[in-house]
Amino acid sequence: MKNLLSLSLILALTASCQNNNKSSMTKETPIEQEAAQNEWITLFDGTNFEQWRGYGSDLMPEAWSIVDSAMVFTPGGQGGQNIITKDMFYNFELSLEWNIASGGNSGIFWGVMEDPAYPEAYQSGPEIQVLDNAKHPDAFVGEGTHTAGALYDMIAPTADHTNPAGSWNHCVLRVDHRINKGLVFMNGHQIVEFTPDGPEWDEMVAQSKFADWPVFGKSPKGHIGLQDHGDQVAYRNVKIKHLVD
């Protein structure tokens, strides 16, 4: 059921929609404006992978390349080529743009605990879903908790503010353990709010597919990760800031 765009086609679509999406990509969300005094750390500026490596590896997987200032994952059948930041983060605000191929699926992880006992980043790191809502089967199950922008398998977006496959989407994830609040913005709209710690979080996990996963969502501090789900996806303008008093 996976209908992948060729790399040339997704880049062509990117160029055609760049002007249409420019205003939504550059507009600051309220949380970005409130935290303007904190400095952004560039995680990907379109030129190198210096801040990234493969999960469980010191190297970047070959399936990831840089094309037109975007980091592009091109599936090759091997699987398991998730990537993570070299640094770990606790209270943070992450801002990035993603562009998924037609029928595609990927994800943004945080709180990833790297451990040889757990070969996949999703075994520890909660996920914000990246998806083609129009064509991927996940969009039609789980009462919306598998759609783009969802806190995967736990909280559905309040509305679908995504641009279609082949277009860029601006996603902001804020996780602040000081006030026990997580927020997700899609293209300038707040779509998800959650508590990352405590009884409410534990109850959400208990009601999800992760209920019996021993380390899932257990670490408030961890790596940021991007998922190899076997579909072509691109990310760009990736930056993060530490939330400090």
Image: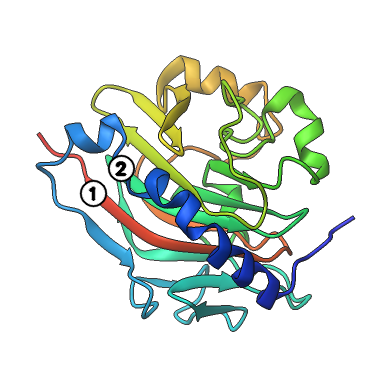
To which residue does mark 2 refer?
Answer: 93
Q: Position of residue 83 (x, y in %)?
A: 51, 66
Depth check: give the residue in front, 192 or 51: 192
Looking at the rendered structure, the secondary structure element under dot 1 is: strand
Residue placed at 49% from the left, 22% from the top? 201
Q: Which numbered dot is residue 214?
A: none
- In this picture, is 156 found above or below 70? above
Of residues 202 and 101, the one nearer the viewer is 101
Quarter holding the N terminus? bottom right
The count of marks equals: 2
Say whether residue 80 is visible: yes
Amino acid type shown at disc 1: Lys
In terms of depth relative to the viewer, which is nearer, 240 or 153? 240
**Which residue corresponds to mark 1?**
241
Q: Does residue 196 appear left or right of residue 145 in this picture?
A: left
Could you tell me which residue is drawn at 54 percent across and 47 percent down?
Answer: 124
Q: Amino acid at mark 2?
A: Glu
How many other residues sit within 10 Å of disc 2, few (<14), some (14-19) or many (≥20)?
Answer: many
